[in-house]
């Protein structure tokens, strides 16, 4: 297992947000985390990324405790795509993606020609080469998300952690991001994402974990975990799950009508 | 082969043009004053002094150039470049274009140190030393408070601690002004707080220059890392940046620079806030271009304003007044005419 969390407890300072989380992710896998607002998804992610100290349990990357990694060593393995980033200065999209190279550039050094070439490739892989010279502060939300994913790609990681990558994107951009996620897994990377839409989990996840009040209530294959019963227990609303032949996969939708609820 | 941001190419041109502007301002500054100096005299005197030969220029003029105007111009360059560099660093580090080098209390600490020195009627050297120590101490206290408070955005805690310590020191300065002798000490305090390069001599340069160079070194070495420091703290760490120690090094460097500058010149506001904005308009936010551009503009602006300060009226106009009186309208003009004014 690439990233393995065992009986993990996490939170801010002395405040405990969650505990008993055991999960793992390996190459070529997409693990999708679902759970209501405030259940601790972002806190768990920050703990998995070593940005918050864990409060208990074990957390290993490639069999070694993550506290033995420096920030740069860690970042060469795991990339993070945050939710809407705070951009304060008008760096060009190229310069933002170039920042993904930080863990592979010495503290006192500047990017080389090779770093710029990799940056260019990452832009091309996400189909945003034409944005390279635009200020990051001026582009649309969807373009920003693509830029941040390109930055993670420029990091050349084995695992990408994405916090709600489809949040605040329009319908088309959501689909584009989901298909990128699938292609990353296809190329051998591991991906961990959180989302609010169970259909997105069906679209790209190889495994799904459901989280409630800081604990995992279910983890397994999408078809086993994303059932109307479990989703109703998770979100407190009726959910219909059906196979949609035209799409070739299952979709979920709230029933909005308690009589039809399972 | 690669498509790259436009500013990448604009950088060297802008920096070259600004270096030319700085040289022009320096020449005008040395030629301006009560004793008329010919452009050829400057060259002759500098060559003669450096080689130990005879300049062939009248001794009075030689003294005016070598002992009066040249040290003052050099001080202007150092002070202006330092305040601008510190401002550029802090605006990036605090992710806010409204930040000036004073944000962590360095100017408040330096003011307090200098005012204590004047109040106790100490020598000029002791006043400078107290100002320098006061500036460093104020930032050290702010940083210590910031590192006690964990679990919150470290940047926000630092800024709030800086505001509080600044207010406290400001109150102490006001108290000393009330207690000071109104005929000798109070004018000296007021004059110091408004900034001036009138009393600069060559020895002062020897004490500012090493501090500025030492502080500049980490800024230059960390120039690319500084770009990443403008991201949210967690984002930068996830990218592999040890934000904590880089922040300590950068804050220490900017504080050293600012303290060295204001301890000799007094408080000169506005440059550290205004100049990085103007520089960013020329070359964009990439720190490897922003730093040299800010320093060139800061130096040229300071030397230019100082030349005006000593030539537009019978008495010397305090620099702080002139820097703001020229800078603020110019800033508003930029704000009204450029789309990227805030950034």
Image: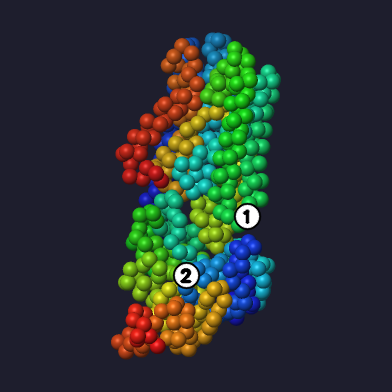
Q: Position of residue A241 (x, y in %)?
A: 38, 86
Q: Give the residue number, with chain letter if any, for mark 1.
A: B150
Q: Position of residue A69 (x, y in %)?
A: 65, 66
Q: Residue shown at 63%/42% (left/top)? A: B142
Q: Residues within 10 Å of mark 1 (few under 14, many from 20)?
A: few
Q: Residues within 10 Å of mark 2 (few under 14, many from 20)?
A: few
Query: What is the basis of the colouring in this image?
Result: rainbow
Vertical placement of residue B143 versus B80, above or below:
below
Vertical placement of residue B94 versus B133, above or below:
below
Q: Residue shown at 39%/44% (left/top)? A: B342
Element under disc 1: loop
Residues beneath discs 1 and 2 located on the same chain: no
> Which of these two is toward me, A6 or A89?
A6
Q: Give the left or right position of residue A179, taking residue B124 as reference.
A: left
- Residue B259 picture quarter: top right
Q: Give the residue number, with chain letter if any, for mark 2.
A: A37
Say which chain tag 2 marks. A
Q: Is residue B314 visible?
A: yes
Q: Position of residue B164 (x, y in %)?
A: 58, 40
Q: Position of residue A257 (x, y in %)?
A: 34, 81
């Amino acid at each position: 297992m690439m990233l393995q969390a065992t009986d993990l407890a996490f939170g801010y300072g002395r405040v405990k947000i969650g505990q008993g989380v055991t999960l793992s992710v390996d190459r070529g896998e997409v693990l999708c985390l679902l759970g209501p607002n405030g259940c601790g998804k972002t806190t768990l992610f920050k703990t998995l990324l070593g940005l918050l100290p864990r409060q208990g349990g074990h957390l290993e990357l490639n069999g070694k405790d993550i506290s033995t990694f420096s920030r740069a060593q860690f970042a060469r393995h795991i990339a993070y795509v945050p939710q809407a980033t705070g951009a304060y200065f008008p760096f060009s999209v190229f310069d933002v993606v170039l920042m993904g190279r930080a863990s592979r550039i010495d503290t006192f050094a500047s990017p080389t020609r090779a770093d710029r070439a990799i940056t260019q490739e990452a832009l091309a892989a996400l189909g945003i080469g034409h944005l390279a010279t635009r200020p990051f502060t001026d582009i649309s939300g969807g373009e920003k998300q693509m830029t941040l994913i390109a930055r993670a790609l420029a990091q050349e990681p084995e695992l990408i952690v994405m916090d709600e990558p489809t949040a605040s994107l329009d319908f088309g951009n959501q689909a584009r991001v989901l298909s990128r996620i699938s292609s990353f897994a296809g190329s051998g990377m591991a991906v961990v994402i959180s989302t609010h839409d169970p259909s997105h989990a069906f679209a790209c996840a190889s495994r799904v974990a459901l989280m409630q009040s800081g604990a995992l209530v279910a983890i397994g294959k999408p078809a086993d975990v994303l059932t109307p019963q479990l989703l109703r227990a998770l979100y407190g609303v009726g959910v219909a799950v059906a196979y949609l032949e035209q799409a070739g996969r299952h979709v979920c939708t709230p029933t909005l009508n308690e009589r039809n609820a399972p | 082969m690669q498509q790259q941001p436009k500013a990448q190419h604009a950088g060297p041109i802008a920096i070259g043009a600004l270096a030319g502007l700085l040289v022009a301002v320096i020449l005008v500054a040395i030629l301006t004053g009560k004793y008329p100096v010919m452009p050829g005299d400057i060259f002759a005197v500098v060559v003669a002094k450096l080689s130990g030969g005879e300049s062939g220029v009248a001794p009075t003029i030689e003294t005016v150039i070598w002992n009066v105007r040249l040290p003052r111009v050099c001080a202007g360059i150092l002070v202006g470049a330092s305040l601008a560099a510190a401002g550029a660093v802090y605006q990036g580090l605090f992710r806010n274009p409204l930040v000036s080098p004073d944000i962590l209390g360095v100017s408040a600490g330096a003011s307090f140190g200098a005012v204590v020195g004047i109040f106790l009627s100490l020598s000029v050297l002791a006043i400078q030393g107290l100002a320098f120590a006061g500036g460093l101490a104020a930032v050290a206290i702010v940083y210590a408070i910031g590192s006690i408070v964990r679990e919150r955005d470290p940047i926000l805690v630092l800024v709030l601690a800086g505001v509080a310590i600044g207010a406290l020191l400001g109150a102490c300065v006001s108290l000393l002004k009330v207690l000071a002798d109104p005929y000798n000490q109070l004018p000296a305090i007021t004059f110091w707080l408004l900034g001036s390069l009138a009393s600069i001599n060559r020895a002062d340069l020897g004490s500012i220059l090493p501090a500025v160079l030492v502080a500049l070194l980490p800024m230059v070495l960390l120039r690319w890392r500084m770009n990443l420091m403008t991201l949210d703290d967690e984002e930068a760490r996830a990218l592999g940046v040890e934000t904590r120690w880089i922040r300590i090094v950068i804050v220490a460097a900017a504080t050293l620079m600012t303290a060295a500058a204001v301890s000799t010149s007094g408080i000169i506001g506005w440059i550290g806030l205004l100049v990085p904005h103007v520089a960013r308009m020329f070359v964009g936010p990439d720190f490897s271009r922003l730093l040299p551009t800010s320093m060139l503009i800061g130096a040229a602006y300071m030397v230019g304003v100082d030349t005006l300060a000593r030539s537009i009226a019978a008495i010397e106009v305090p620099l702080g007044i002139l820097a703001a009186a020229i800078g603020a309208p110019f800033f508003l003009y930029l704000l009204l005419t450029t789309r990227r004014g805030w950034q």
